[in-house]
Amino acid sequence: MLIQIYGVTTVADAIEVDRLGVDNIGVVVDEGIPTWDSVDESAACAIANALTRARLVALSLSTDPQRIAATTELLKPAIVHLARAHLMTSDELARLREQLLPHELMLTVPVTGEESLAEATRLSRVADYLLLDTAHPSTGVVGATGHSHDWDISAQIVAQVDRPVILAGGLGPDNVADAIARARPAGVDSETRTSRDDDRRRKDLAKVEAFIDRAKVRDPDGNARRKLRTDEGKL
């Protein structure tokens, strides 16, 4: 089970989360788009340089290929994560895919209903990974909301696409095992529910450790794992 922890904003947290043995650590670099979990370029680079085990995932909220390329060049992550890929055309994404090589590409699919299956299929054609996330019920903002979505639809997406699927959206130690059992993803992602109660920009290391333990204990025995390409060392 691939474990991804998002919203790391300090070097201290990056070092400790990395030490706990997660696979991916996600950073949101400030691109001039308001969001509560972003860091400036200097802090993003320092976090990237602090990692010794986990792979860096750099999230871009932009749909501008030049801005996305600039973020990629700045951080040189293993994976570039586009949170608003659903707002881009297939042709735009295909061109960007070629431009960003050899960096891998993770694309967010907002799970809003049955229509999400068609969008997941579209995005899977140019993605190395899909990340299934939640649209806020009031604002429509996708990601970092603390809200979960219909895991049965996520399960349909997992079964339908031929790319590794990472389940996100309101996951924490209390519900990750149930989410894995329902959706059977290749990986799970947590941000809001592994943050500290007194400061959501900092990670609660006890929550992170519990999230890892419970996700690994509930690792499904076949479908999700077969979607990971073992020749690339992702297990």
Image (tube, grey):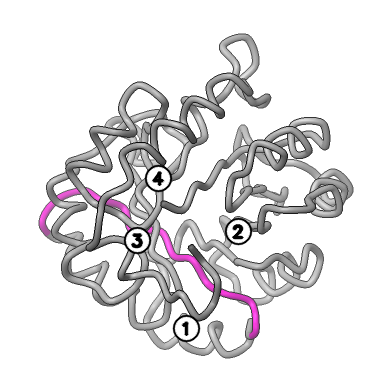
Comes first in the chain, label 2 or label 3: 2
Which residue is tagged 1?
92
Which residue is drawn at the image coordinates 52% and 89% (left, top)? 95
Amino acid on which disc 2 is placed: Ser
Q: Which is nearer the eye, 195 or 233? A: 233
Badge nearest the viewer, 1 or 3: 3
Comes first in the chain, label 1 or label 3: 1
Which segment did they paint magenta?
102-114
Comes first in the chain, label 3 or label 4: 4
Which residue is tagged 4?
142
- Label 1 to label 4: alpha-carbon separation: 20 Å
Amino acid on which disc 4 is placed: Val
Amino acid on which disc 1 is placed: Glu
In this rendering, is residue 121 above or below 165?
A: below
Amino acid on which disc 3 is placed: Val
Badge nearest the viewer, 1 or 2: 2
Comes first in the chain, label 2 or label 4: 2
- Is residue 72 found left or right of 161 in the rendered image? right
Badge nearest the viewer, 3 or 4: 3
